Amino acid sequence: MTASSNATASPRRILLTGAAGGLGKVLRQTLKPYASLLRLSDIVEPQAPGENEEVVVCDLADKAAVDQMVKGMDAILHFGGVSVERPFEEILGPNISGTYHIYEAARRHKVGRVIFASSNHVIGFYKQTETIDALAPRRPDGYYGLSKSYGEDLATFYFDRYGIETLSIRIGSSFPEPQNRRMLSTWLSYDDLTQLIVKGLDAPELGHTVVFGMSDNPHVWWDNRLAAHLGYEPQDSSERFRAKVEEQPQPAADDPAALYHGGAFVAQGPFEEV
Ligand SMILES: NC(=O)c1ccc[n+]([C@@H]2O[C@H](COP(=O)([O-])OP(=O)(O)OC[C@H]3O[C@@H](n4cnc5c(N)ncnc54)[C@H](O)[C@@H]3O)[C@@H](O)[C@H]2O)c1
């Protein structure tokens, strides 16, 4: 095992994968104050670079291209890949090989810190009547959740073996506002997501820390005490959207959206090969 890195060293050159995606576009703006250089990458061309920005079009499944993309960076925010449930064959390249390529490149280029966009779908099969912490066994709810679970395993391995530190954020639902009843529990505001990332970059010691990415919502199923060292203090709450969300019809009692942490994802598939 090697010593942990100090991510607060400046200048801070940060690679953001998934930069053309929903969260990537937001983080590109909110993270500006925390980076001396933001290298923005995606398989589709992100918007043209502004001041202190670079753009790299790269397929995460391409190991050599990922290696070049990571060169010269101090930290990686790994948000790229397939972000919904899909057949295994579609997940394999971007999420499974892709995340491996990110860690291999981090090792080769001595990047000490990764913020990994993990997902609640790593533990999606827990019932909404159960409250869990980060030590609860993972219960992935599909191939997408399995790929994020593998990403968390990579994070543990690359810390144990090479000292590369990771904050895995099991993002709940990060959108401008909660869109349904389940999201009243799982919602993560963009500001709170940004705070989590910055805490992950600044923490003196991270090892591999797993944190549930949720705002200060009143009724939650996740306990973040094991990530208390981050000092994360969410500033938003889904409560102000409750009345609006509750105008929607109640889901049926046996609807997965009302039963499982992972909601509708638990009932997707199988994906039959024809
Ligand atoms: N938004 C949420 O609520 C939420 C919840 C849980 C986890 N996450 C995770 O956060 C990350 C960002 O989520 P998002 O909502 O912005 O998703 P998104 O689908 O909008 O963005 C993902 C980006 O990854 C890119 N991508 C896909 N395949 C690629 C490949 N082979 N090579 C390079 N880039 C590729 C896509 O082009 C896209 O721009 C994802 O990893 C997602 O799994 C998001």
Image: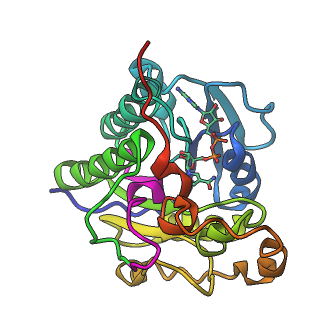
Q: Position of residue 72 (x, y in %)?
A: 48, 37
Q: Is residue 69 above or below residue 262?
A: above
* Residue 34 at least partly seen: yes
Q: Quadrant of residue 173?
A: bottom right
Q: Is residue 195 above or below residue 114?
A: below
- Where's the C terminus, which quadrant? top left
Residue 117 shows in this picture: no
Q: Residue furthest bottom?
A: 218
In magenta stretch: residue 21: no
Residues 59 and 73: in front is 59
Q: Which residue occupies the foreground of this view, 170 or 90?
A: 90
Instruction: Residue at 77% x, 66% y: name it.
Output: 177
Residue at point 79%, 42% (across, down): 51
At horizontal 47% and vertical 20% (from top left) the residue drawn is 65
Point out the stretch of residues depicted in magenta. Answer: 111-131
The correct choice, above or below, for 151 with respect to 101 in the image is below
Q: Is residue 273 above or below residue 34?
A: above
| Image quarter for ligand 1 | top right
- Report how many numbered discs are placed on residues in the image: 0
- Which image quadrant: the N terminus? bottom left
Residue 218 horizontal/vertical position (percent): 62, 87
Of residues 44 and 241, which is closer to you in this image? 241
Q: Residue 50 location, x and y as percent?
A: 81, 39
Counting from the top left corner in percent of width and height, residue 138 is at 30, 60
In this picture, residue 235 sits left or right of residue 128: right
Query: Residue 129: within the magenta?
Result: yes
Residue 39 horizontal side relative to residue 100, left or right: right
Q: How is the image coloured?
A: rainbow
